[in-house]
Image (tube, rainbow, N blue to C red):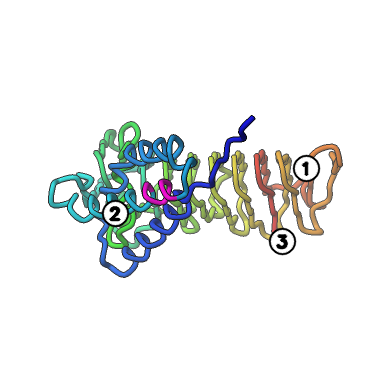
Amino acid sequence: MQSRIEYRSLFWPLALIGAGVTWLLYQQGILSPANISVLFRLWPLLLIIIGLDLLYGRRSPRLGALIGLGAIVLFVVLMLIGPALGWAAPVEMKTAAYAEPLEGAESAQVTLGPGMGGLNVTPLRDSSSLLEADIKYVGDVKYTTEGGAARVVDLSQPGSVNLGFESLGIFLNPDQQLEWNVRLNPTVPLDLTARVGTGGVNLDLSDFAQLTRLRVDAGTGSLDVTLPAAENPYRVEVAMGTGAGTIRIEDGAAVELVANTGTGGFTIDVPDSAAVRLVASTGTGSITVPDWLARVSGADDSRFTGDSGTWESASFDGAATAITIQYQGGTGGLTIR
């Protein structure tokens, strides 16, 4: 009986070397984002080459090496000539500016929805506008406004922004950062909704003393929110898919915060003197609270990887101004500080 000898293919070591060389060439400016976008567009060719290696490369180290070297040469040549042949991803970053005049608005319901890219919200200073925005985006943007005193404004991308693998090269260019910079008037009662598919969310609402409600729906990316000490109690709802989140609550705020996260740690900064109740659970990870928050129900259980329970400050019962936090997390811990 003859034993079959299998050789370890050299395809994958050579493929890793080729990927490293490609990245170095890009870092040195020899390959452009257009060249890299060609690589993403031709990714099905990689599946064919892997199939050839599985069929033939494992029978002979020499044949596996030839397949690997041939693949590297082929991809380099195609990346170099692809832009000239029109194979680069036809994705164009667009810019736009929007302004909504104040014109007697007594309240505002604003929806901001970048499908892809970071969202930054800051206050307008001494302005006759309700909203001003400068955005960099791909795809399409919808801007609608209605109402007079009760103004409703929607600035968002309809549906999902589907660029395809071949278009990932746009994000390798540091000059093409998709970003929405939005400034809102803090003197008008504000109901704000932010929906972001992929990208960071930074909301500086510390000066919005008339915030009435905030809803944040973030897919993939980071979250950084500062909540104000508003004139009246308000509710905040946060839902995150993947990414780390930080929420800061200003001293004197009366807020009901409901947060749900999938993957990533979450941090909530609360004033040391605040009346606070926390009801929280995590799928995996611990819950860390300061000494002045005492656990009133629930306990660590070694049978589970996560933690859950209720914590309260000594001043919570009977407090006229209080912060309540309901948190449910998946993978990652919660820190109250």
Q: Which residue is mark 2?
A: 73
Q: Nearer the viewer, residue 293 or 161?
A: 161
> Which of the marked residues, 3 or 2, is nearer the chain's N terminus?
2
Which structural element holds mark 1?
loop
Tell me which corner region of the image, top left, top right, bottom left or bottom right, holds residue 158.
top left
Residue located 46% across and 37% down the image: 54
- Which residue is nearer to you in this view: 318 or 225? 225
Q: Which residue is found at the position 43% from the left and 55% from the top?
A: 14
Does label 1 or label 2 sit earlier along the sequence? 2
Mark 3 neighbour class, 10 Å CA radius: few under 14, some 14 to 19, many 20 or more: few
Residue 149 shows in this picture: no
Q: Nearer the viewer, mark 1 or mark 2?
A: 2
For the N terminus, which image quadrant?
Answer: top right
Q: Is residue 306 above or below residue 18?
A: above
Which residue is the site of mark 3? 272
Mark 1–mark 3 contact, CB under 8 Å?
A: no
The kind of secondary structure the magenta stretch mainly shows is helix
Residue type beneath disc 2: Val
**Mark 1 crowd level (few <14, some 14–19, many ≥20, 10 Å Cα):** many
Give the SS element for disc 2.
Answer: helix
To which residue does mark 1 refer? 307
Query: Quick one: 221 or 38, which is closer to the camera?
Result: 38
Residue 186 in percent (x, y) is at 41, 53
Real-space Cα separation, disc 1 to disc 2, in angstroms: 53 Å
Q: Is residue 63 magenta?
A: yes
> What amino acid type should be assigned to the residue bearing mark 1?
Asp
Give the residues drawn in magenta, as a range. Answer: 62-67
Which residue shows up at 31% across the image and 41% down it? 155
Q: Secondary structure at mark 3?
A: loop
